[in-house]
Amino acid sequence: MSQDARHDEEQATQRRAQLLNVAYTDTSAMAEKPLFRDVISIDQMRQYRIIPLETDKSNILFGITTTTSQQTMNSLTNHFTDQKIRFNLISDAGFKDYMNLYDPPKKVVYQDIEINEGDSKALVGEISEMLNQVRADDMLAYLVSQAHRLNASDIHIETTSGDTRIRLRIDGVLHPIATLNADKYRMLIGAVASSGNVSTAADYAQQGHIAQKVKMADGTDVDVNVRLETVPTIHNMDVVMRLFNMDRAMYTLDRLGLSDDQRKVVDGIIAKPSGLVLAVGPTGSGKTTTLYSMLNSLSNDERKIITIEDPVEYQFDGITQIPVNTKEKKDDDTSFAEKLRAILRLDPDIVMVGEIRDNDTARTALQASLTGHLVLSTFHASSAAAALTRLSDVIGQNPLFVSAIRLVMAQRLIRKLDDNTKQPYEPNEHELEIVRKVVDSLPEGTEKPNLDSVTFYKPGSSAENPYGYKGQIAIREQFQMTGALRALLEDRTKIISSQDIEEAAVASGMRTMMHDAILHVIAGETSFQEVFRVIE
């Protein structure tokens, strides 16, 4: 409380004392505040809102508040028969100050979360106990700050029939870090809902965004910037918070881990920006990061770039970003397709569509890409080949289809072995057979590694890194409409499967995602277990 606010409260309390015809004590003006712990218990002070201010053998002066009952004062007078009892009115702020002296609040030590494979129960117990001592805003800020420290991508709040579980997704794998009782869950979910503008009573899935700065009880400033996804369950509302890293320097092509061949293709598109570029993969595979890295490289004073997203995930200066709420169908203007048609009238050079979800958006994106615009978008599919078959299902047999698409890039994220702990490993015959088949099927023109001189690795372990992995790398497959692939797609006489497309793409020089993954295994960057976890 500021000095001016405290002064105003003391003046108001003094006027109240005059109206009640009782004496008044300004505790803020007291140089010393001696404590008298033997007069009444701390629980009684808190319950009856009364504080012993002065005492000796003959007298006791109690400080009371406007909510202290007359019955309490009569009871104290009758109890202390050997001393003269007096009561002076004090302010609520004065009462709180004294209670903090008699019963100092426990200092919360925000310990760093250390993920430990062998002792996860102990970690969950320690973090849970700490969270039970802090206010709701601090709980949220603490979880976000620790998630950033551990390079987590998401925070999961999951309700059960008993306690609520909190987990962090680190390098694609979930780790439990705490449990909350029902009261603490309500506090946390209330703070999340209020900050993210979602309802805790909704019986439908919701999306929200939290962007705020929180000063925690220990003075730490935390920048909370997360996207919310909520869903009602049989027990309560579950929440997933996706963390955003707003450092624009992180979104560059150099940080995407593109191979020389892949980078050459992307650089060619940036040099002559037109056509449709699709980033393909499941949720959490880094599609949006890839597209924003491209946008960041394309952004300059000579180009107008507009994005339409649901929601806007990263905010970049120099790019016009338009949010679209597809959950609320108020009118046609809320759709991606209508927004896309509207922004094309603003004469953009480059457009990013958050996701192609329907026929209308797909057709509009194709038309825009054929009229001199570069259109970037994400699309949910299991592979680059599957993306084409799914897209053709959405838009039908369209002769413009082949001409429009410049690049289809599918990707997944796999964990990278920790170079400090990885261990040499002798693969079994089944694993070696897979490696041989994959290497033998590499497209013509690709340099094939000599498997006789390869050392394979598996994850090791250390106190600092019990899991043996550190960070993630993207495995990709990408193709352009060239060679055998273009000829196949222009043939309207037969039905084409995703397997046909993949074979034609490989014949045209594409490395599949499995090719890319096994080459990372051969390079000692990841393990067989990790590849098989991510790719069937």
Image (cartoon, rainbow, N blue to C red):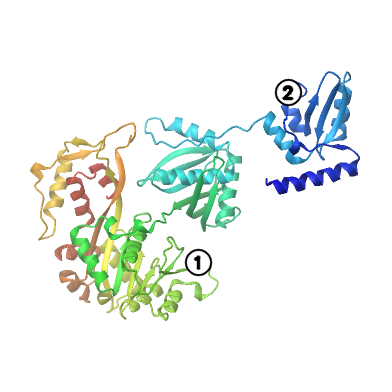
- Which of the two residues, 125 or 493, is positioned nearer the viewer here? 125
Label 2 amino acid? Arg
- Secondary structure type for disc 2: loop
Is disc 1 placed on a helix, strand or loop?
loop
The label nearer to you, 1 versus 2, is 2
Disc 1 residue type? Asn
Is 142 positioned to the left or the right of 482 in the image? right
For marks 1 and 2 on the same chain, the one whose residue lies earlier in the sequence: 2
For label 1, the residue is 325
Residue positioned 41% across, 64% down in the render = 316
Can residue 185 be spotted in the picture? yes
Residue 336 location, x and y as percent?
Answer: 44, 71
Left or right: where does residue 155 sit relative to residue 385?
right
Q: Quadrant of the N terminus?
A: top right
Placement of 87 over or under 310, stated as above or below: above
Q: Where is residue 480 in the image (x, y as percent from the top left)?
A: 22, 68
Q: Along the line of sight, which residue is nearer the eye, 497 or 507?
A: 507
Q: In this image, 534 relative to 104: left or right?
A: left
Crowding at mark 2 (Cα within 10 Å: few <14, some 14-19, many 20+): few
Task: Give neighbour class at mark 1: few <14, some 14-19, many 20+ (Cα, 10 Å).
Answer: some
Q: Nearer the viewer, residue 331 or 82?
A: 82
Q: Residue at the spot x=35%, y=47% of the render?
A: 172
Q: Mark 2 points at which residue?
A: 37
Vertical placement of residue 502 versus 347, above or below: above
Q: Residue at x 86, y 41 (%)?
A: 17
